[in-house]
Image: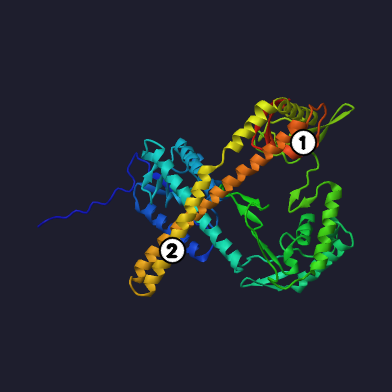
Amino acid sequence: MKTIMKIEPIRNRPGKARTRVAAYCRVSTGTDEQLVSLETQKSHYEELINANPDWEFAGLYYDEGISGTGKEKRPALKRMIADCKDGKIDRILVKSLSRFARNTADCLELTRKLLDLEVAIYFEKENLDTGSMESELLLSIMSSLAESESVSMSENIKWGARHRFENGTFKIGYPPYGYSSKDGEFTINEDEAKWVRWIFSEALNGKASNAIAKQLNDLKVPSRRSGHWAPTTIRHILTNEKYVGACLFQKTYTDFRFKRHTNYGEEDQFFIEGHHAAIISQEDFDAVGELLEQRAHEKGSNKVKGRNHRRYPFSGKLICGECGGRFKRHINTTGSQCYPVWVCVRHLKDLDSCSMKSVRESDLEYAFMTMMNKLIFAKEEVLHALLDRVRGETYKNNLQRIEEIDRKLKKNAEYVRTLTTIMSRGYIEPALFKKESNGLSAEADMLAEEKDRLIRAVTGNVQKTDELGSLVKYADKAEPAGSFDGDLVARFLDHATIHSRTEVTFHLKCGLSLKERM
């Protein structure tokens, strides 16, 4: 009779420590569907790690409702890296590169950091194991694809939002103070609306925003979020078009680096009147706006469409060559002497983040006028020669390509009409019609996008040519100046990069960049 012996698996081999394996999960939004997906990922990795006898479960790290376009916004990812530094993790499992990082630079930086800590990462979808890689090339390519996917998704989302802006179907998720919202529809909340009317009334009586905020805090009027009223909150209410029943969409936009900016005209905006019931009359709203503008103008910081009025010639034009921060004007005191300087705002906040020292305003003025005088002296050799060359460029290639795109778009539209006709007569199957129609639509979108890009390029070149022509006209008539003229800064300077106390580069509106000693 046969004897069968069962040999139990060795769970813990003597002398060999098990690999401590953790998993990282992330979902982009906080919707119920995405959170279900997160729970599925968590269960998957717990079972996978515990089922391997050579692995020891080292934890599950997950971020909910957070975009993956930047590593700074993900606390669980930061905590996992900290645990790697503490020697608690040997290996990390991730569903895909896009779940780990949708930015090539972040992906490579994090991977290198973890490899330095002898922690390998395994990306399931791409079947990519950083522990066995001979080169970073494959990882770089794959992470670039993940980044492109993120950009594509972002553009799709923005396109959808713009489409809803255009047809008036965009739903505002969070109503302003004074309103309640149900299914995207605004209704007046009288408990709050009475204070909105009071704020406008006080502003019309001449009270400043800080005085109104102080009075609301003294009266213990509850605010929407923090419970505390700030002058900025009051100014936001006084300038918010929603209180007259209107909506201005796309006040901000996101650039290709996923950074949000105030929209000063870089992107289209959409204004809808009569969107909901008004709390404030248009007359009172306009009157308050005029008061705010007048008060800001008197202080020298007039904000027109959100932009600061240039109080000093170099205001808003100086950029730190070390950290990229803006420069701010200060008054320095040495003994009995007081003199204005410009200093990087990041240097002011944290000396370790930027070591750029302050620059005397008089040195900047001297350097700028030296540059302008050089241009006057060399106007024939530099400015006239450059203008002749620029005007000689007719942008023929771009213009010809725009004409070619117009012909292709016209032909594309003819194909669509023909396809629709033969479909209506039953000559082709609906599935084939849909496939061909989608292809033509994609081609039209691609051509239209290229045409817009070329038009912007041509327009930008024309603007620079006009700026250069203006500079040439000034140089032809001007004499070398001995004193500083701030009007020239406003007319010709786009911005300046401060490299040190002794060196600056002036970037002119016409496209010239000229380095000067201080």
Q: Position of residue 196 (x, y in %)?
A: 79, 67
**Mark carried by residue 414:** 2
Q: Position of residue 332 (x, y in %)?
A: 82, 32
Q: Residue at x 16, y 55 (%)?
A: 4
Which callout, 2 or 1, points to the residue nearer the camera? 2
Image quadrant in which the N terminus is located: bottom left
**Foreground: 344 or 116?**
344
Q: Residue at x 63, y 66 (%)?
A: 172
Cα separation between marks 2 and 1: 53 Å
SS at mark 2?
Answer: helix
Q: Position of residue 502 (x, y in %)?
A: 71, 25
Image quadrant in which the C terminus is located: top right
Does residue 309 appear in this view?
yes
The count of marks equals 2
- Please give the residue where the numbered disc 1 appears in the rendered image: 488
Of all residues, the one furthest to the left in this rendering is: 1
Q: Residue at x 84, y 59 (%)?
A: 212
Q: Amino acid at mark 1?
A: Leu
